[in-house]
Image (cartoon, rainbow, N blue to C red):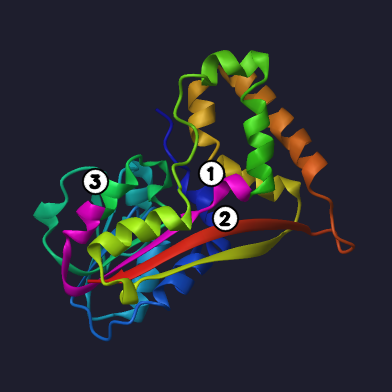
């Protein structure tokens, strides 16, 4: 199976890290002793946690070997573990903050997943999650259209390509069954990223969302054809501004709750 490309992912480090910073800013713990970053990727969000709480023990986990290796090479002051979020995480111990930035959207059964995160928290601990509302992104709608093209459909039909992000109401019901409702904060933010060109939006997708599509397609020729057709669809969706920039709007959902 294809793995993530950390270097391509980090081409947009500023844009990808901004939601992590916004999520961290809403965590009201002065001096946490232990923090878990679930789906740490290349460690950019973990590094932001370290900057906010330099005295805390921080553990980052991810199921991508290449991402974990990249994180270890960039941030040698933090522990990074190759581990899937759906595994039993209890051997890691308890944490004052369980944090996850744009990571669990590909994992099903968020109700039990969030319950498992809750069990990792110390008393008065905080759960903080950010999820992309990918179905509201115009580029994603264009990508979905390609799933129904005959030459690709036969390879994509039985693959799990869609994200599992639910509505804010869904997450409120889960969180309010576990946490004091007065401690729950849920909000959305649409980030408008000024990209230099359509190529940047394509590269953004190539580093993450397109990986399972490419993995499902049978050879490089069809992958190249798929990528070219996605680029054509992007041209139909996005128009350059007077200065040449392409505005890439990306909506995200934030969840914070205290135990």
Q: Is residue 229 above or below residue 201?
A: above
- Helix, strand or loop for disc 3: loop
* Front tag of 2 and 1: 1
Coordinates of residue 222 in the picture (x, y in percent): 63, 19
- Earlier-in-chain disc, 3 versus 1: 3
- Residue 85 visible in this rendered orientation of the protein: no
Q: How far is the residue under mark 2 from the one under mark 1?
A: 9 Å
**Discs 3, 2 touching: Cβ within 8 Å:** no
Q: Which residues are magenta?
A: 115-136
**Discs 3, 1 touching: Cβ within 8 Å:** no
Coordinates of residue 39 in the picture (x, y in percent): 34, 52
**Residue 76 numbered mark, or none:** none
Residue designated by label 2:
11
Q: Quadrant of residue 249?
A: bottom right
- Earlier-in-chain disc, 2 versus 1: 2
Q: Residues within 10 Å of mark 2 (few under 14, many from 20)?
A: some
């Amino acid at each position: 199976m294809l793995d993530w490309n950390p270097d391509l992912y980090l081409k947009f480090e500023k844009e990808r890290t901004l939601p992590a910073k916004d999520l961290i800013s809403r965590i009201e713990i002065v001096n946490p002793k232990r923090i878990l970053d679930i789906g740490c990727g290349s460690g950019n969000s973990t590094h932001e946690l370290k900057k906010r709480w330099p005295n805390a023990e921080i553990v980052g986990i991810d199921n991508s070997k290449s991402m974990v290796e990249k994180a270890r090479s960039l941030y040698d002051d933090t522990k990074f573990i190759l581990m899937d979020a759906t595994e039993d995480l209890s051997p890691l111990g308890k944490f004052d903050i369980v944090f996850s930035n744009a990571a669990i959207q590909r994992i099903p059964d968020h109700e039990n997943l969030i319950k498992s995160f809750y069990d990792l928290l110390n008393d008065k601990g905080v759960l903080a999650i950010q999820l992309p509302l990918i179905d509201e992104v115009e580029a994603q709608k264009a990508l979905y259209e390609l799933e129904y093209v005959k030459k690709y459909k036969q390879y994509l039909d039985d693959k799990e390509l869609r994200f599992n992000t639910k509505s804010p109401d869904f997450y409120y019901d889960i969180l309010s069954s576990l946490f004091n409702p007065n401690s729950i904060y849920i909000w959305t933010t649409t980030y408008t990223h000024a990209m230099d060109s359509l190529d940047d939006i394509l590269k953004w997708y190539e580093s993450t969302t397109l990986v399972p599509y490419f993995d499902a397609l049978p050879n490089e020729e069809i992958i190249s054809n798929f990528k070219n057709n996605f680029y054509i669809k992007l041209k139909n969706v996005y128009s350059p501004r007077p200065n040449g920039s392409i505005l890439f709007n990306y909506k995200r959902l934030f969840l914070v709750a205290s135990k």
